[in-house]
């Protein structure tokens, strides 16, 4: 199975009196890494929430699957967990497995499988830590682990690397490029423009409207980046 194309046509979103997104028309190619960049408050997370059907947008969103619809996985922007929540990393991953009744302890085979998933994101030794006691980067690794199992066909990521150390960011880049090699479509909000230059096939720069849409080598020139993040672009 490979991932879908995503097409939005004239997508707009108004929240209260704020025009958050205006006339967004873009195409995400199947099996590509498509980055969304832009300043804080530029509408990146809102666009993803529209794609996920969580916002009352105008316009259209189309997912064009090559066959039957596959699995969509989502890594949200850093989640908070109450420090006292009596739930370990393993409990958390186990509870997300909707094929089993909630609150049962994992069978030995399930536990071994989940430990392997944690190993992929560099969390093998931390399965019995409480979720609330994890660092920001460790939490992001766990959120990535939940997205990778079962294997996704479409992966949507909202700043997955924000709290990661250098090794973690390098590991995530490898995970994303490996998934692309398998045909997975990846839509990826990212602030690290060097990471986008390294691995994205395509970048959309967003600040309420689409400010640039094309290859990272063309879109992320110093002038364009300055323009995008200096808010001069808002008046454009
Ligand atoms: N529920 C809401 N009600 C009103 N305004 C909202 C709501 N959610 C988001 N906004 C506004 O929409 C704008 C876009 O927010 P969004 O979170 O999509 O930006 P972003 O590009 O993801 O920012 P960041 O890089 O900081 O994560 C912001 O000005 C925000 O205040």
Image (spheres, rainbow, N blue to C red):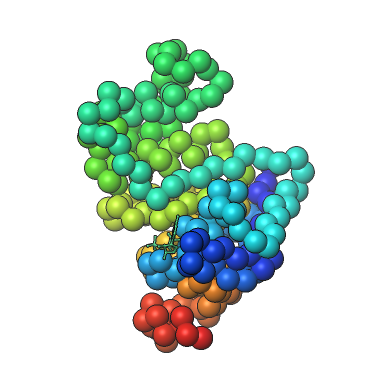
Seen in the picture, residue 158 relative to 9 is either above or below; the reply is above
- Residue 149, position in %: x, y? 51, 34
The answer to whether residue 179 is visible is: no
Q: Residue at x 63, y 65 (%)?
A: 11
Whether residue 230 sits left or right of residue 174 in the image: it is: left
- Residue 60, position in %: x, y? 69, 59
Seen in the picture, residue 160 relative to 80 is either above or below; the reply is below
Q: Residue at x 29, y 55 (%)?
A: 166
Q: 3 or 55: nearer the eye? A: 55
The total of numbered circles placed on residues is 0
Q: Residue at x 50, y 39 (%)?
A: 148
- Residue 104, position in %: x, y? 43, 13
- Residue 2, position in %: x, y? 67, 47
Locate residue 93: give its quadrant.
top left
Seen in the picture, residue 225 relative to 150 is either above or below; the reply is below
Return the residue found at the far front. 17
Taking the image in four quarters, ligand 1 sits in the one at bottom left
Locate residue 124: give its quadrant.
top left
Q: 229 or 144: nearer the eye? A: 229
Whether residue 51 sits left or right of residue 120 in the image: it is: right
Seen in the picture, residue 96 relative to 11 is either above or below; the reply is above
Whether residue 77 sits left or right of residue 126 in the image: it is: right
The answer to whether residue 209 is visible is: yes
Quadrant the N terminus occupies: top right
Q: 193 or 158: nearer the eye? A: 158
Q: Residue at x 33, y 55 (%)?
A: 162
């Amino acid at each position: 199975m490979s991932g879908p194309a995503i097409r939005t046509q004239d997508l707009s979103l108004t929240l209260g009196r704020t025009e958050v997104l205006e006339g967004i028309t873009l195409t995400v190619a199947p099996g590509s890494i498509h980055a969304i960049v832009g300043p804080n408050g530029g509408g990146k997370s809102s666009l993803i929430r529209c794609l996920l059907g969580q916002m009352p947008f105008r316009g259209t969103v189309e997912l064009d699957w090559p066959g039957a619809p596959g699995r969509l996985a989502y890594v949200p922007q850093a989640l908070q967990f109450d420090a006292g929540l009596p739930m370990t990393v393993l409990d958390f991953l186990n509870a997300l497995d909707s094929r089993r009744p909630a609150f049962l302890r994992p069978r030995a085979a399930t536990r071994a499988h989940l430990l392997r998933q944690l190993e992929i994101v560099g969390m093998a030794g931390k399965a019995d830590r409480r979720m609330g006691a994890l660092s920001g980067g460790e939490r992001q690794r766990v959120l990535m682990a939940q997205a990778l199992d079962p294997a996704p066909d479409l992966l949507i990521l909202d700043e997955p690397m924000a709290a990661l150390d250098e090794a973690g960011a390098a590991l995530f880049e490898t995970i994303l490029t490996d998934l692309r090699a398998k045909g997975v479509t990846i839509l990826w909000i990212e602030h690290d423009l060097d990471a986008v230059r390294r691995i994205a096939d395509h970048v959309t720069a967003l600040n309420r409207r689409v400010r640039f849409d094309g290859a990272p080598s063309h879109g992320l020139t110093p002038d364009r980046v300055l323009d995008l993040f200096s808010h001069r672009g808002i008046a454009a």
